Amino acid sequence: MNDLPNLAQPDDDPHLWLEQIEGEKAVAWTDTRSAETLTAFSGPGFEQDRAALLAIMDSPEKLPYISRRGDYLYNYWIDAAQPKGLWRRTSLASFRSDTPVWETVLDLDALAKVEGKDWIWAGPSTLPGSHDRAIIALSVGGGDATVLREFDMERCEFIAEGFALPEAKTDAVWYDRDTLIVSSALGDGMATSSGYARTVKVWQRGTDFSDARIVFDVPEDHLACGAGVIPVASGAPLVLYTDVIDFFHNADSLGTLTGPQTPLDLPTDASKQMTETALAVKPRTDWAVNGETHPSDAVLVIDYARFATGDRNFQCVFTPGERLSISHFYWLRDDALMICALDDMRPTHTIWRRDGDRWTSEDVTGLPKIGTAYVWPLDTIRGESDGTLLANIEDPLTPASLLHLKPDEQAAPAILKRAPAHFDPAGLTISRHEAVSTDGERIPYVQVGPETVSGNAAVHLTGYGGFGVPMLPGYNAGIGKTWLEKGGISVTANIRGGGEFGTRWHEAGRMAGKRLSHDDFAAVADDLVKRGVTIPARIAAEGGSNGGLLIANMLTRYPERFGALFCTIPLIDMRRYTKLLAGASWIAEYGDPEQPDDWEYLSAMSAYHTSKADADYPPILIATARKDDRVHPGHARKMVAKLKTMGHEAWLYEPSAGGHGYGKDNAERATFTALGYAFLREKIGWT
């Protein structure tokens, strides 16, 4: 991973050496640039914001999110005393109290100290039923690759001779106490071109993983493969094998431990959720079956026994509209399907229950119709669920509440915990507006700030616009404290490429349409000026990952509309992105630069190639992470080097760890964010 890819240069790139992640020359250059950035912007405002952000992240009153495994509620907790965190548990009765009594299961700070490793928590998988064993994933420094180790949940210690695997991109699920089903990129030839697992192995306790038999594999140019276990009321569990062809296509087969046996006769672009007795399907494109055409994003259900015998008489339980879209769906039990939708970005929740061979609906009541309301099962294992749900509700001015719901009992939601307010909302208001993009599409955006605008307001504008991920109006304590409370305005743009209005919204901003996604964001900036909210020089824009590609394109395509840009963990070089770390996995979102037709449009949004010496660009801070094993830090490094060579104001910040995010712990995340905001404020003249 740290070596330069063994590939011919696609163009004359004098900064290619910066792709050597741990190369001595590259690290020296990067560390010098990072030090310059810290020196330039770590003044009193930065220190004040960093302290405020860290206090928010480490607040002892923040919500402890929980999941139930067997008799206990589990939570992973990070604060000032435990910067790496504690995995802990309590009872539901204790959790309901004002002062829950927690039992520590694993102290990661203590473990890291004893073992001399920079361990970062990556999550557990506990043995269904007894939950007395766990496979715990730990990352070194915060990357996607993890170490797996078996853990005794009763003795609260790792098992010396238990299941264990070294660092790799690996997923393991329990089949039974002595058997794991493992999808891993570990070993020669075991990774796809995207760096993920291309084989599934069945691993028996007491044997060497290298000897575990391969029961499923996929072509190297597919994204990944995986497997899941479907509990069966009587008899051996079923295994669902998945060939992840690309980000939006996969082929599933049912089978046993010996491998896949029965392919699921469904479109590869459909999302599927199944139990032993029922199947739910959401096609991504219109699907004609059994003499009926089901529209994109409809949700269809059928008894699996009928489906297995060739019946395709699905019942439609959700039909999308122009601004009514599915958010997600999942089985609560074999006889209850939860549908979570967005009606013009307002949350709705419906449970469909089996009634003979048909399904009937009931709305989940007591949840707000504005802001965000995310609902999920309390139990981690569906077959162990008693129907209890949890909900997180919030809006941009109202901190989150954690609710407990029991729809089976027709009980109103009960508030379990409330998060504290971290900024003063007095005088602030939430409003929604629409900008008109280059092709006439209406682009919604949410504005939070003073009711009366000055015409010269300091605006923080953010967006994402990719992979069908919606940007919903939630409570951002950091922006509230460091921007809104100081008199600024926060704006979230709901640009195409996201999932606010379903697949059609995503499709419009995918591949060649990504250019429209960027046009949308620029249109929102322009609309803020037209409405008299602010002027271009006072608009500070931030975006990360796919949003980093967005911000880089604002620099090169719409520089006149912004005062300063904060571009984080970004893709920028769209000529080489498929050759860097997990880049090949995103071809279905962006296109393949090796294909002339794709490169024709990609070249216009590859900011690394379109940047010019004679342009008038706003100042930009590009921040990444050295341990990011998803988006290569070379994107950020090379763009800063090129811009500086051309005489533009460009700054780089790259901490040595952190993975695909803003830091490996709260202190690093607070520093990363505060540095970005100090830069933005100074460059838009808002001090």
Image (spheres, rainbow, N blue to C red):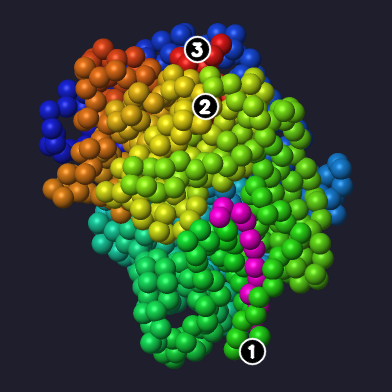
Nearest the camera: 471 or 181? 471
Q: Which mark is residue 356?
A: 1
The residue positioned 44% from the left and 89% from the top of the image is 311
Left or right side of 268 for 480 = right
- 353 in the magenta segment: yes
- Indicate whether 397 appears above or below 365: above
Q: Earlier in the sequence, mark 2 or mark 1?
A: 1
Q: Position of residue 33 (x, y in %)?
A: 37, 14
Q: Main secondary structure of the magenta part?
A: strand
Mark 1 surroundings: few (<14), some (14-19) or many (≥20) residues within 10 A: few
Quick one: 502 or 308, which is closer to the camera? 502
Q: Per the image, is 387 magenta?
A: no
Q: Is residue 39 above or below residue 612?
A: above
Give the extent of the magenta segment.
344-354
Determine which residue is flagged by label 3.
685
Element type at marker 2?
A: loop
Q: Amino acid at mark 1?
A: Gly
| Quarter of the figure with the C terminus | top right
Mark 2: few/some/many CA within 10 Å (<14, 14-19, 20+) = few
Gap between marks 1 and 3, in whole Å? 66 Å
Q: Quadrant of residue 399?
A: top right
Mark-to-mark CA distance, 2 and 1: 59 Å
Residue assigned mark 2: 532
Residue sitting at x 63%, y 15%: 48
